[in-house]
């Protein structure tokens, strides 16, 4: 839909520059403000070893620590999680041909919540995995939910979109009830508080140790989905038309759902539930690019990254000496934008 | 235009389709020879669409063989078939927005490898097709803003971008005004590639089809050339409606005119 290749590449370039600006801004702003120039120098020095103005000696060790050990991994996590969620949202919307789909559609959020609840509330009995206990339980929960949804929806002749959505709803209800049951009977007030914090999402746990796994996964999956733009376009034509365009819809649908669920599961288990990003970013980007995934997907990935970097910055700096869970911020920001889009009517949300 | 360079023959042999113990089509055999325009007529629920869906692989026949020349349709992948066969379905609508050019370009999907981008040839082909279906000024318009007739022409253009050697029309002119019905079917006829079409309107079927198969209750009741096949007795038997059938003096077309009757439930 973008008029020419030129305008597409201009937009792409603009967004890439914006990603870099967002990173630098985000590592500089916080309870300790650091001049942009110093942040640039530190990041450049740490990555490439280029030492401008003897940055290694002129800047305090604490500043270096704040930027390199605390803020920079967190900004990178925001970048990867944002792009991953926005990408999964677009893929889900194409795969089930429904503009309401989001990455958590297959019961992933409730599954991960159940896993996290188990690990937090029954932590001592269930601590099988040491330090990453919570993360692994959340991931297993997400996996179980996805598996159940796929199993339920593929019983019978073939997997249909309606069956998928209904199975997702049922599994969500079941797993949420189970989590609530544990919370209801929990004696440990602190644990209940942590569960509820966990479900609101946070990037505060970011560190250099966990980053490589999530980053590599997202990069590999993003490259894969970027190569599948023709398939996703054809999927949007409906099942029958996709088949007559040569797409084996059942195989591709299952593969895309599983891959996207795996990625969402990893994201959720790392940083809790961050709502709205996967739903709203694809819709906003479609206003500019149309539904053609060739242009939509790269832009979605960049916009998702930028959006989450800035919401995380907001989440940790809006209240002095404290931070808001990022899931609250994404929804507080996302909902009004969505409302505005609904009222303006110019964009049809795929419903025409 | 590259279209119609080669031409294929469709051979359907004893195809049956059963779903939850109900046999929807029963041992149907039919043939579409090279370049022939063949129609399937019959009342609602007779199995026309089911038969066509078996042929274009949305469903798999319970038994029987379907061949497009040497290509075994039941065993081949959708991609292999999509390179040879194009399908214009019942009224298509997508929930997502594409421009007309993007829609038509989608017809190139079966010919593309995973990372292959649109080549100059693809773009030229799409330009040619848009001209052919008279939509060249619509290329950058939004599909969702078009009228029903225009949308169906875009779908036809998308199917032509597949460079099909055989066409299936599954009641493609449902809900369309007569102008667009004639436009679509005349366009298809002008391509001179083998075509199998399920049609509702008997006069329209007689006008375009060289050969007709009549389906009732999942079986082929009879088949033949329209001018011999279509008789008031047959229409009464198949549709339970009285009619006159005559040849119009001006157009030389066969026309079916119906007698009004109270419905007989």
Image (spheres, rainbow, N blue to C red):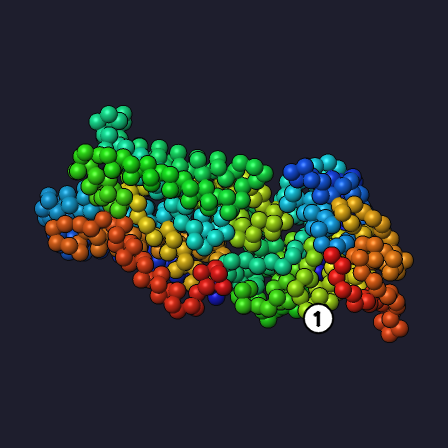
Query: Which quarter of the figure has residue A167?
Result: top left
> What residue is rendered at 65% in x and 64% in y?
B175
Subunit of label 1: B
Local crowd at mark 1 within 10 Å, few (<14), some, or many (≥20)? Answer: few
Q: Closest to the observer: B230 or A204?
A: B230
- Mark 1 — residue? B179
Is residue B124 visible in this depiction of the protein?
A: no
Q: Is residue A325 left or right of residue B170?
A: left
Q: Position of residue B139 (x, y in %)?
A: 57, 66
Q: Position of residue B199 (x, y in %)?
A: 74, 58
> What residue is rendered at 25% in x and 52% in y?
A328
Q: Is residue A64 left or right of residue B173?
A: left
Query: Which quarter of the figure has residue A345?
Result: bottom left
> What residue is rendered at 69% in x and 47% in y?
B50
Q: Is residue A246 left or right of residue A312?
A: right
> What residue is rendered at 75% in x and 55% in y?
B43
Query: Which quarter of the figure has residue B186?
Result: bottom right
Q: Is residue B70 left or right of residue B116?
A: right
Q: Position of residue A208 (x, y in %)?
A: 24, 38
Q: Closest to the observer: B89 or A184?
A: A184
In the depicted structure, whether residue B2 falls above or below residue A146: below
Q: Position of residue A312 (x, y in %)?
A: 24, 51
Q: Closest to the observer: A51 or A115?
A: A115
């Amino acid at each position: 839909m973008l008029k020419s290749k030129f305008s597409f590449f201009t937009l792409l370039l603009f967004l890439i520059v914006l990603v870099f600006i967002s990173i630098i801004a985000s590592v500089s702003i916080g309870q300790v403000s650091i001049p942009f120039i110093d942040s640039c120098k530190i990041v450049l020095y740490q990555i490439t070893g280029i030492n401008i103005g003897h940055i290694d000696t002129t800047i305090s060790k604490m500043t270096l620590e704040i930027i390199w050990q605390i803020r920079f991994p967190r900004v990178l996590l925001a970048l990867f999680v944002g792009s991953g969620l926005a990408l999964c949202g677009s893929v889900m919307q194409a795969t089930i041909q429904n503009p309401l789909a989001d990455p958590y559609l297959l019961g992933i959020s409730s599954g991960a919540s159940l896993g996290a609840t188990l690990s937090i509330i029954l932590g001592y009995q269930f601590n099988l995995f040491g330090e990453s206990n919570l993360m692994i339980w959340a991931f297993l929960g997400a996996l179980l939910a996805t598996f159940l949804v796929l199993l339920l929806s593929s019983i019978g002749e073939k997997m249909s979109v309606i069956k998928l959505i209904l199975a997702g709803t049922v599994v969500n209800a079941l797993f949420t009830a189970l989590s609530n049951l544990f919370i209801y009977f929990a004696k440990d007030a602190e644990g209940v508080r942590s569960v509820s914090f966990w479900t609101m999402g946070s990037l505060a746990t970011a560190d250099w140790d966990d980053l490589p796994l999530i980053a590599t996964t997202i990069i590999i999956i993003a490259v894969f989905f970027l190569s599948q733009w023709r398939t996703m376009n054809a999927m949007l034509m409906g099942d029958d038309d996709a088949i007559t365009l040569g797409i084996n819809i059942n195989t591709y649908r299952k593969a895309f759902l599983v891959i996207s669920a795996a990625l969402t599961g990893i994201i959720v288990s790392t940083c809790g539930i961050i709502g709205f990003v996967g739903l709203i970013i694809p819709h906003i980007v479609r206003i500019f690019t149309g539904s053609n995934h060739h242009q939509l997907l790269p832009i979605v990935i960049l916009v998702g990254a930028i959006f989450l970097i800035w919401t995380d910055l907001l989440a940790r700096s809006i209240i002095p000496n404290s931070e808001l869970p990022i899931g609250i911020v994404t929804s507080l920001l996302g909902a009004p934008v969505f409302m505005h889009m609904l009222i303006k009517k110019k964009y049809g949300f795929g419903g025409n | 235009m590259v279209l119609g360079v080669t031409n294929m023959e469709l051979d359907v042999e004893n195809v049956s389709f059963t779903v939850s113990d109900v046999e929807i089509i029963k041992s149907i055999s039919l043939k579409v020879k090279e370049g022939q325009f063949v129609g399937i007529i019959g009342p609602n629920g007779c199995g026309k669409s089911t038969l066509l869906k078996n042929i274009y692989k949305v469903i798999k026949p319970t038994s029987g063989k379907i061949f497009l020349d040497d290509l075994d349709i039941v065993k081949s992948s959708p991609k292999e078939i999509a390179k040879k066969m194009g399908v214009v379905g019942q009224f298509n609508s997508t929930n997502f927005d594409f421009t007309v050019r993007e829609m038509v370009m989608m017809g190139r999907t079966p010919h593309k490898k995973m990372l292959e981008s649109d080549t100059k040839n693809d773009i030229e082909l799409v330009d040619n097709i848009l001209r052919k279906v008279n939509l060249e000024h619509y290329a950058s318009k939004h599909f969702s803003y078009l009228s029903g007739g225009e949308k169906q022409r875009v779908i036809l253009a998308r199917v032509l971008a597949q460079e099909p050697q055989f066409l299936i029309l599954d009641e493609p002119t449902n809900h369309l005004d007569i102008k667009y019905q004639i436009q679509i079917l005349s366009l298809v006829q002008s391509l001179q590639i083998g075509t199998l079409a399920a049609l509702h309107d008997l006069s329209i079927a007689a006008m375009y089809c060289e050969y007709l198969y009549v389906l009732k209750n999942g079986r082929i009741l009879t088949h033949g050339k329209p001018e011999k096949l279509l008789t008031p007795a047959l229409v009464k038997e198949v549709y339970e409606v009285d009619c006159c059938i005559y040849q119009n003096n001006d157009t030389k077309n066969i026309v079916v005119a119906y007698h009004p009757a109270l419905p007989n439930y």
